[in-house]
Amino acid sequence: MLDRSIIHLNVTDFAVAVERLQDSSLKRMPIIVAPQQAARALVYDMSEEAYGDGVRKGMRLDRARRYCRRARILMPRHKLYRKAMGALVSKVIHYTPLLEQGEEDGHLFMDVTGTHRLFGPAPDIAWRLRKQVLKELGLDPVWSLASNKLVSKVASRMVRPLGEYIVGAGEEAEFLAPLPLSLLPGLSCKEVGLLRDFNLERIGQLAQLNREQLAVPFRGRGEYLYDASRGQDRTPVLPGGTADTKFSREYHFEGDVVEQRELQGVLTSLVHEIGRQLRQEGKVGQRIGVSLTYSDGRVAVRQATQAGGTDNDFHLRQLALTALSRAWQRRIRIRSCVLACDRLLPRSRQQTLFVLRSCRELQQEKMVTAMDAVCARFGSGSLRLGTAL
Amino acid sequence: MFPLSLHSYYSLMRGTSSPARLCQLAKELGYSGLALTDCDTLSGLWPFLAACKQEKLRPLVGAEITEPGSDERVICLVKDSTGYINLCNLISRRKRAGNFSLEKQVGEYGDGLLVLSRSSVLLQSLQKQGIDLAADLGSWPTEQGGRLRRWAEGRNIPAVATPAAALGEEKDRDLFLLMQAIRTNSRLEPETEKGRPVPAWLEAPSVYRDRFAVWPGVVAASRHLAERCSFSGPSFGIVMPPWKGKGQDVAAALHRDAYRGACKRYGTDLSEAVVERLEYELRVIDSMGFSSYFLVVRDIVHRSQGKKNHRPARICGRGSGAASLVAYCLEITNVCPLKHNLYFERFLNPGRLDPPDIDIDFAWDERDAVLDQVLQEYGSHAAMVSTHVCFQPRMAIRETAKAFGMPPGEISGLSKRISGLRRERGKTLLSSLQNLPALKGEKLVSPWPQIVALASRLIGIPRHISVHPGGVVITPGAVTDYVPVETAAKGVPVIQWDKDSAEEAGLVKIDLLGNRSLGVIRDTIAAIEESGCSFDEEYWQPEDDIQTRKTVAEGRTMGCFYIESPAMRLLQQKAGTGDFEQLVLQSSIIRPAANDFVREYVRRLHGGEWLHLHPQLAEVLDETFGLMVYQEDVSRVAVALAGFSHARADGLRKVLSKKDRELRLRDYQQEFDGGCAARGVDAETRKKLWQMMMSFDGYSFCKPHSASYARVSFQAAWLKTHYPAEFMAAVISNQGGYYSTFAYVSEAKRLGLRVLPPCVNESEIRWKGKGSKKSIRVGLMAVKGISTEVMGRIIKCRQKQSYTSGVDFWQRVQPPKDESRALIQAGALDGVTTEKNRTRLFWELSQFHCLARRQKSTPLFGVQLPDAPHLQPLAPRELLRREYRMLGFFCKGHPLLLCGVKLQGRTRASELVHCKGKQVSFAGWLLSGKLVSTKSGEAMEFLTFEDETGVVETTFFPRVYRRYASHLFAGCPYMLRGRVEEEYGAITLTVEGVRRL
């Protein structure tokens, strides 16, 4: 089997890097990106300097400010970051279609296996890409090359915030052995605790345990740890957008909210967006799921279903509200919510023969059609249901 | 209009205003009286009656009775004293019986009551049972009300408009919504136009007249109905517990038993002083009808020991009752009132109108059994007194924050740092909060300001009813004929009145309290006897022991009852006397508002010059160096200088400890001033005397109480001096002392004891001290997260054979995995392995559970684990870190020493005595702190630190405290910079700078 060549490209502190591109005076200054007008905002991203002072992602902004009083606070500009991410992808896409990317986080995995004849050796591709991205976008990414995603990611973690690393095929275990276990991705807190109990601190120490031994404390996860500690990872690079099995929308509140009415309004807006997508693609969804992130970071997910599916905003909204009431069981404020619609079916063009629809239902259908028409002409936000306000 | 249905905040989260505020509002609105109809309770009866008296309003006693599981409810108004008894029984039934039906129970207890209902079905049924009824139309004419009115007219039942108010005023609406959110454990949602019932508030009579103009007569009916209720509050007189004396004359029985006890205490040849005092006390007791009370308390105390007429060894009769020679002779108390010159009038005097109480302490873990015995014996005639738990600033902020949906971590993070928060006069709670030094540099962002603003309005409102720590009332008839009774969460019957209301009603309370130090003394003596030493308590006089006096005089009393706090230890060091009389005085003079007098006392004790403020005070204050030290000194000074009667002087003493004293105090001050002036006392002296009286603000003790406590303190100090290992083990095992286990373990090490680590083969559940080996063994109870069941199994399973390996232990004890991990981390399983390699033990634990998983049960026989991989043992520092996490202390060494080079240049605690007046750097581990206010209201703190050589008391004056308060946490190491101060031999450090190590 052909040795794979996976490049991991990572622009560290992506949001900060993009902001510094926009304003060169921000260079070498501690930066915190957070929605500062919200009373209870969380840190979205921070520069290396602020990190050094103890600021972390997801930390409360007021605490972050105390840790790093000299930091400049910037508002997150998600559109700008998405645009920058798009630009980054556009530079990379020429080298390989096998490209796995985060939404706006500056992470990219590229599978360049077999592109030798087209673009030369993989390290050359990585060098070239870095130079190109630096020259054309002004971003200076870390890159690493290895035979799989796991090792390339560990290599990037090791060299960040600047640099590059190549792990040759067959050298993975040797490369990982002296590194601390904290660099190994995918370990849960409980697993880290267990490893500490056994006084295992380096990846190499973990690699000395065989499969049977690892199964003792870690059960099924022992397999993963066995492979990971030896630098073995067979997961493919997954190009985004291929799995089209659900539609979802996410909303982050600037602070956090406790009023049900506000949350219901946001869900209504998200329902409208998903409803439009369903209707545009001629599909109906049978299940609506609501995922709530509480202020303390815990997540609750609940669903509501409708047999046969629907693409009607009013029905979808009802399902979403049912799922919401099931999900919001704790007496705690909400930071963000995700609305997802899955179990998609193609919409039947045939009208039902035996079930008579009420006048109200017909009116609602007409209204949704009219709203779609207005939105199509004047933009998606031009018309909304009153409950979404 | 006469308002016939109103909730006060005693409806517990169903009403917003106090009875006093409701009465004030009713007066302002022009009502002649009002009815208080709290929800299933008469908790607010006495404050309501007092407020009506104050506002000159006519009170109507009543309650709203609800039916569990339905929305049905009725208003019951008391017409006469039979109605009152019935209402108490009805509420008790509602609160205590599972199957409660309004239809049935109101019918049963309806005699003497006027019942208002909104349900025609219920009215119809009750009418058939002959109950006096009215149809309640509520505060608005509604369609449903119209139907009810028509229906009532047809059946000759009066229909009446009622305010049905849960709020005093309209502005309380948001407070009411918050209360609902707290009560129902839900999120606070803003009041919307739809979907939420708007609570009603008390409005002016004209509003109701206009509103109900469409239904003539329904407003006037309220007056007519009110006139039918002539009952204006219960009057029982003083309700004494009945003595079950089998037909004996109570006074004669008390006389006989008191003399019998006196002979036992003083020998058969009683001195004239004893006889005189006994006769005087017996006369007063008899004339006031208190004979049965003494005998009942005696019976309770003696029965609790299981042996009648035997000296109760482990009680401490305290409070003013300890001033009674009769109580001493009946062996209810342990200090001789004659020897210590205790003032009997503080307890009982002929003019005293309110009932005094006798407080008895039992060992904390024996108290519940005593209570159960009393409640069982007296049945329906006994119940405990309740405590109305009111919102305090911290609780109010926490509950409001929960209703606002704040995350638990954020709430606890804030509430941990606001322990000293109190609402200052003239300031909002928010500004008081923001001024807290512990929150320095933190900005309270939205929604915290809203939370605090709303929370401030909750303060003082009763949240729920709880059980008084030990107050019991015993009544001649069933308790439910006097006051409604509920069942508390722990299953005991509890009356709906708190101690003040019970006292107002005339119910005499007996306090049976739990005291941890009695448990400590009991356990220490048991351990001494177990080790083979003989110990005769009968002739135990710790006060006369020279070594014990030295311990007390040097302030080496950490762990000793009542004299272990830093303030007390410093005072003992400064006084340097160590004798019983001075200890009695010291434990009373240490009180929040008496700092200046403490200093003056020490000065005078050491021979400083002083004069009585007035020559007439010589008789009263001679033994206290001219200072008012005890509660009764206030009364005695008032009697001696201002000509107060005993009863009036006692009233002044009592009012000083009340929260709402200001108004009443003004009258007393005028009277005191007038009385003194009439006896020629000059204005300057009067002012100084009054100031000294005001130092009794907050809590203070009477001499009999201090003397009783001092005796227990001396017993503890004696045990610590002579049997330190057994004593320290008992202190830690009984928990609940002033300091943390960490501090007590350090003290044990300073006493030269070895602290042996926990061990599944050696440790008992409790700590065990062995004086012969100069060691204490850590008890299994010290390991965090170990359940009582597992501890019991560990002890039981090792009785046959000690544990030989980890597997052997897990196999026989079968502890849950997390508890096994805790035991390994604490080092409790080190003794069962040869290698003492805890990582290996962790691995074997995983293997054991893996095997159990595969076999789907815990392996019972001959488990052979496969060889473990080679795992490095944990580094010594990591081992200590884990041990500390599990135990909260180090068995060997001091955590401060882990700071290594950071400790360079420090002065140790033991060296401070040589550095008087010098600037030093001291590295200390923060143990505890006491937040106080300066005269100008600024916060400052006395903090206790220790290093491996000793304990150091430090002072953080306001400026330094403001700067460092937010960085100071108990259980952390700090480098302190400051000046060593010395006062009468006591060394303290005045801190100027702090650095976290």
Image: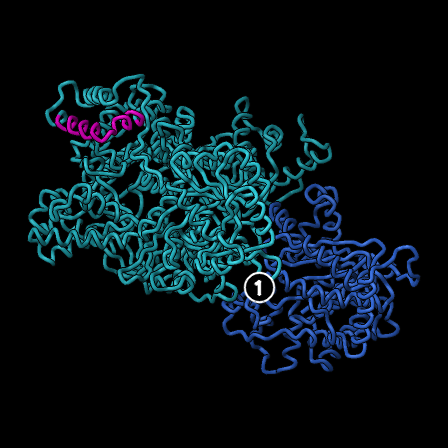
Chain colours: A blue, B cyan
What residue does disc 1 label?
Answer: A59
The image shows residue B600, relative to residue B887, as above or below, that is below
Q: Hey, what amino acid is under mark 1?
A: Met
Q: Nearer the viewer, residue A75 or A211?
A: A75
Question: B319 left or right of B616?
Answer: right
Q: Nearer the viewer, residue A50 or A340?
A: A340
The image shows residue B231, relative to residue A162, as above or below, that is above
Q: Nearer the viewer, residue B938 or A130?
A: B938
Q: Nearer the viewer, residue B475 or B260?
A: B475
Specify whether residue B234 is painted magenta: no
Residue found at x 85% / y 55%: A308
- Tell me where residue B193 sits by quadrant: bottom right
The image shows residue B611, relative to residue B85, as above or below, that is below
- Tell me where residue B899 sits by quadrant: bottom left
**x and y percent of residue B49 in the render?**
35, 46
Chain letter of mark 1 equals: A
Question: A28 left or right of A183?
Answer: left
Residue found at x 72% / y 57%: A174
**x and y percent of residue B624 in the render?**
15, 44
- Magenta segment range? B276-297
Question: A249 left or right of B155?
Answer: right
Specify whether residue B279 is painted magenta: yes
Camera sees residue B776: no
What kind of element bears circle 1?
loop
Of the 4 image quadrants, the one containing the C terminus of chain B is: bottom left
Camera sees residue B636: yes
Q: Main secondary structure of the magenta part?
A: helix
**x and y percent of residue B982 in the render?**
22, 54
Residue found at x 28% / y 24%: B295
